[in-house]
Image (tube, helix red, strand yellow):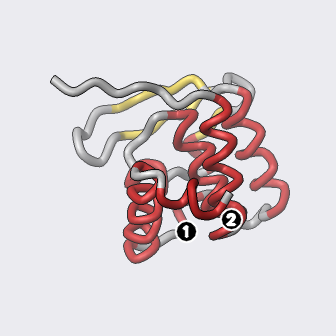
Amino acid sequence: MNTVEAASKAEVDMIHAALNKKYGQLYADIWKVGVNVSLRIGDLLALKYANLNLEERTLKLTEAKTGKLKCIRLNAPAITVIVRRQQEQPTDTWLAIFAHPLEYAVHSIFEALGKNSLVLNYV
């Protein structure tokens, strides 16, 4: 069985900087929230502010792949990004604004990150 090692804070910050430099703040923010809440990309891009309870620091959603209801505890880095994005774009519904073409683009970019090509070329 394959094992997965978590990225270090330095690696997360490096990837965030690479995404921000090459693709902009939106992709960097998707990465930062995603790495901190451990969701599949489809579930991550379907998040709405209505799914969040910042006072309780929780996120509730039904996983698209499994249909299971999940309640995820949000950590400080995820909350920081979410609050900043909400303040910058108060009329947005969070990441739910994206359609399938962007989901594919995000998936492709993050897949390339897994191969370290972006990090090595753009930091």
Hey, which residue is sitting farthest right in the picture? 87
Judged from the image, the secondary structure of the residue bearing numbered disc 1 is: helix
Name the residue: 60% across, 43% down: 33
Seen from the viewer's position, the closer of residues 18 and 47 is: 18
Residue 59 position by quadrant: top right
The residue where tag 2 is placed is 92
Hey, which residue is sitting farthest front in the picture? 120
Amino acid type of the residue tagged 2 in the rendering: Asp
Q: Where does the image place residue 11, in percent across and percent down from the top left?
A: 61, 37
Whether tag 1 and tag 2 are in contact, CB under 8 A, the answer is yes
Q: Relative to 40, say whether 71 is above or below.
A: above
Name the residue: 61% across, 61% down: 27
Q: Where does the image place residue 50, in percent across and percent down from the top left?
A: 60, 47
Query: Which mark sits nearer the N-terminus, 1 or 2?
Result: 2
Amino acid type of the residue tagged 1 in the rendering: Ile
Judged from the image, the secondary structure of the residue bearing numbered disc 2 is: loop
Residue 93 position by quadrant: bottom right
Answer with left or right where residue 39 lies relative to residue 52. left
Q: Where does the image place residue 57, in percent across and percent down from the top left?
A: 67, 26
Give the numbered dot on residue 97: 1
Hey, which residue is sitting farthest bottom in the picture? 101
Name the residue: 76% across, 54% down: 86
Name the residue: 68% across, 22% down: 56
Compute the Cα span from label 1 to label 2: 7 Å
